[in-house]
Image: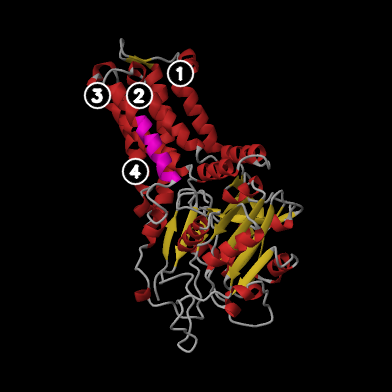
Amino acid sequence: METPVRFSSCRGVAFEVKPHADPFAIVTTPTQQDPSNSKRFWPLATSRVFPSSIQRSPSSHFCDLDLYEDDIHEEETYDVEKQNFHDQDQPSKPASSRKNESRLSVILLDQGLFTVYKRLFMVCLTLNITGLVVAATGHFPYARNRAALFSIGNILALTLCRSEAFLRVVFWLSVKILGRSWVPLFLKTATTSLLQSLGGIHSGCGVSSIAWLVYALVLTLKDRDNTSPEIIAVSSAILGLLCLSSLAAFPLVRHLHHNVFERSHRFAGWMALCLLWAFIMLTISYDPKTKSYSNEIGSRLIKSQEFWLTVTITILIIMPWLTVRRVPVKVSTASGHASIIKFEGGIKAGILGRISPSPLSEWHAFGIISDGKKEHMMLAGAVGDFTKSLVSDPPTHLWVRQVHFASLPYLVNMYGRVLLVATGSGICVFLSFLLQPCKADVCLLWVAKGVEQNYGKEIKEMVSRHPRDQVIIHDTGVLGRPNVSELSVSSAKNWGAEVVIVTSNPEGSRDVVNACKAAGIAAFGPIWDS
């Protein structure tokens, strides 16, 4: 058996997958194979079927949202945990029939070398490097004299890009302003791309903050007679922590050693913030003439730009932790492959939430299912240690963050007609749009196996109460694996969708998005650092 490989994004979007040849390929027996036809089979004519009477053994091919790493984990991700779309009852397609792709290349390279994420990263880095060069050549004296301020400014920018409270407001304003029929579609899709790719600004500002701090430290060392050893030591320590945090966030490290990334990013960031406060106090109180520290720093502190930027950063970081609570939960399971976690209180559609068994060590974020009234629930496929423990040893209480956050699904209400495509338990981020009044006309395409067996009667009833032209369910246990890309394009055209939003594994999301774009339909799916 192949060992699952865990991938994660900075927003909490994590993928835990079992590598195999092709997640969406249809495997047929030799007697079913048509040598004159392609190797894929697409039972489109029978896709609008909700089979429940045929009993088959449950499967675990889930697309689980265990949002995004906490950083920032979407994510946050979109911490989102996804398992590969994998049918245990059918053999996988031979690897020789398909290009042997690296999972990392699918997540990072196959999405394109000039994605919005990478363009935002380059824009931030280019602007900062340009300013740095101009300052170093003496044409920008303000930046030369306040290099540390520019480093702190970049830290503030990257913190804003990962602040769930701030982004909740940004997403709300975007839907409120752009969610009107007269707003051009290209403006809506451009905004969606930007909001989904804010991780590019986060990463670009992170690298830039290191560059500015290096420059500030070099200038300080050249003028060490007018500074103190303590200031130099604290600056060097901050630089080391920022470098450690950035190296841990390097894609290869982050996806292959997720726990290293998550803990390094969190604790190195906290330590750097504490040292930043020490740096602010030391630099403001130090008098280079007397080479001593002054106790009267109140007026200097208030006038310091660095101080106010650091205050803002501190508030943004502390805010989510002030809402952490240990709450009672009800955990049920229809099979050993997924659990349903119920909480008190209704939640708006498109919102995601974080839960944890131990708040200082790990956080997992999931899509929220709610009718907006008395309760909400999370659907967690048993694909990781934490989600498996929910099935084997259901807890009575869990830690939650009461500030829920918005991600890509929240932007559904920006559009008029939308096709939502989900595989496995990725359905959890979309179900609320069927249970609550929705500004957009949505059509749901769900590809899963053993709906009632794996997800329970409650989930089945939620989707079965809607018209067949609005909810399309393809049970792979009965109909086999479809060509999800073609099925999505066909469904989008039939529905007249302005945009398609997909939640699947990396390969599946990529294929659906590319197929829709090739057909002239705007499409979005989770990116590696969404």
**Residue placed under numbered mark 3 in the picture:** 221
**Residue placed under numbered mark 1 in the picture:** 304
Q: Amino acid at mark 3?
A: Leu
In the depicted view, which residue is nearer to us: 521 or 256? 521
Of callouts 3 and 4, which one flags the residue occurring earlier in the amino acid sequence?
Answer: 3
Instruction: Let me know if residue 126 is in the magenta part.
Output: yes
In the depicted view, which residue is nearer to us: 426 or 417? 417
**Residue placed under numbered mark 4 in the picture:** 244
* The magenta segment: 116-128
Residue under the point 50% across and 69% down: 85
Closer mark to the observer between disc 2 and disc 1: 2
Q: Amino acid at mark 2?
A: Ala
- As drawn, 148 above or below 527: above
Of callouts 3 and 2, which one flags the residue occurring earlier in the amino acid sequence?
Answer: 2
**Residue placed under numbered mark 2 in the picture:** 147
Instruction: Let me know if residue 102 is in the magenta part.
Output: no
* Quarter occupied by residue 46: bottom right
Residue under the point 42% across and 67% down: 4
- As drawn, 284 above or below 196: above
Q: Position of residue 425 (x, y in %)?
A: 59, 64
Does the CB distance between marks 4 and 2 fall below 8 Å? no
SS state under label 4: helix
Closer mark to the observer between disc 4 and disc 2: 2
Q: Residues within 10 Å of mark 4 (few under 14, many from 20)?
A: some
